Amino acid sequence: MSIKHILFLIFATLISSCATNPASKNKDFVLMSEKAELALGLKLAAQYNQQLPLLDEKDPLAVFVNEVGQRVAKVADRPELFYHFRVVDNATINAFALPGGHIYIHRGLLNHLNSEAELAAVLGHEIGHVTARHAVQRYTQIQGYQLGMTITSIFVPMPTGTSNFTNLLAASFISGYGRKQELQADDLAIKYIPKAGYDPAAVIQLLATLKRLEDIDKKEKKDVGDKVNEYHGAFASHPETKKRIALASQQARTSGNEGLINHQRMLAAVNGYPYADNPEQGAVVGQRFLHPDLNLQLKFPKRWVIKNTPQAVTARIRQKKVYFELSIKSLSKRRTAAEVLKSIFPKRHIEGLTSGNVLGYPSAHARIKASAPHVSKAYIDATVWLKDSQAFLLFMWAPRTDIAQYEDDFKAIRNSLQPYDEKKSGGIPRIALHIWKKGDSWLSLARQSHQILGRFTADRIAALNGMGLKQTPKNGSIIKTVK
């Protein structure tokens, strides 16, 4: 086939690939048929349903989400699709849509919703991505780039080996869409939810909550000394939240519709669920880290800030280059704890290697003179213990010149390591309902919980209820707290 023929086929495809958008009714340039869109959605959903920690579809919270989602989907622009709504069982504040009507909302976001109408707003936004075929538009953008690379490669030899197109596409669905598409999804949510019988002003409250969470995130990062970036939790790639609130407010006012809110039903739906991660992932409770499934707990001195992620438990002293990390490494063959430690660090850097016992398992401990994350010349206090085919790696480090002033902290953290005891330590933080009474404040609730969510517990409990620190509910109101 000649170069001329190849170019003709490519451009013929581009010219013929226009379709009417179901939501906007405008002509869109797309490179994917609806049949292919639905097939891709089914394929990706099958993968996600295996990989993500999902609540069972019969779980009461999952049933509630599906009920509200189906109600909104029924009045959307593509009612002929079968919509599927699933709850991701972790603390991430996010929601996303796959092609063809597969919609996921994280429990972390559900915890922060304060009405059934707000839930309808979130799901209406994600349904908007589906009805406007934003996934197909994203596919076309990425495929267009690939086509451009193909045309270029005809004239200029290109290196072999390309990125996995499907993985790139799938990742883009989770991270969000472009500014124009996000605003269109907001518009569609405001269009759909009153048709489903919900108050469109819920979009305003939802976006205000996201803005508060963004502000708390920045405040916490400044407090600990981390670099402050834009909010990376919910809707990370969405337009600036303030602008979205202003646009949503204007559109909600002009719609002139009032509808169902159902504040108490939403609160009842999340009551008793974990605030953060579930027991399988462990949890930070004040200055402690608890992991019931791994049967361990740790306690940190007051000046430490702790963070739990799927990859590791991390911590650092506020405004200091002093760090902690606990992670797990899978082993492929039997080794001693000392051998595992030596495999991680060059032998010449290891000082004072000793063997012992941690939580009833064989362990090794040493001080390492090496570079570490954020500290090029560090002393690393390293402890490794083995449990079956897993190696637990507990590392704490500081600049070599400052190590003496942090050794007591390191020793206290090491010595605090003990088996998890629910009777003594309590469970992981969960959503609980509280009747607001005279004299209550967000600060008093935070103190009663022993700062269960850390230094900014009051801010987080207020945000959990869609409010700031200076706002208060009416006496007798039912609110969410964390216990």
Image: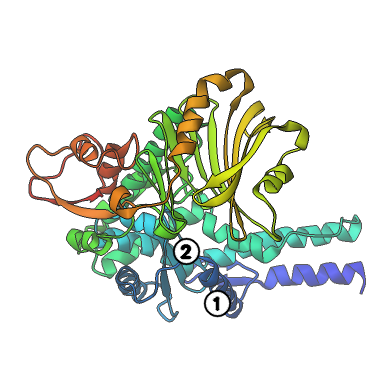
Secondary element under disc 1, as helix, strand or loop, is: helix
The answer to whether residue 372 is above or below residue 27 is above
Q: Comparing marks 2 and 1, which lies closer to the viewer?
A: 1
Residue at (28% x, 60% y) in the render: 270
Q: Are dots 2 and 1 in contact, CB under 8 Å?
A: no
Q: Nearer the viewer, residue 12 or 248?
A: 248
Whether residue 188 is visible, yes or no, is: no
Residue 420 at x, y = what percent?
39, 52
Residue at (58% x, 58% y) in the render: 172
Quadrant into which the N terminus falls:
bottom right
Q: Which amino acid type corresponds to the residue marked 2 in the rendered image?
A: His
Can you identify the residue that label 1 sits on? Answer: 42
Q: Left or right: 198 with respect to 88?
A: left
Residue 51 at x, y = what percent?
54, 67
Question: Which quadrant of the view contains residue 213?
Answer: top left
Residue at (68% x, 73% y) in the render: 16
Residue 246 at x, y = what percent?
34, 44
Can you identify the residue that label 2 sits on? Answer: 129
Whole-number angstrom distance, CA of label 2 to CA of label 1: 16 Å
Q: Left or right: 424 with respect to 31?
A: left
Residue 396 at x, y = what percent?
56, 34
The crowding category of the residue bearing disc 1, from other C-alpha atoms within 10 Å (few below 14, some 14 to 19, many at least 20), is some
The crowding category of the residue bearing disc 2, from other C-alpha atoms within 10 Å (few below 14, some 14 to 19, many at least 20), is many
Residue at (80% x, 72% y) in the render: 9
Q: Which amino acid type corresponds to the residue marked 1 in the rendered image?
A: Leu
Q: Nearer the viewer, residue 408 or 152?
A: 408
Q: Nearer the viewer, residue 264 or 8?
A: 264
Question: Which quadrant of the view contains residue 18?
Answer: bottom right
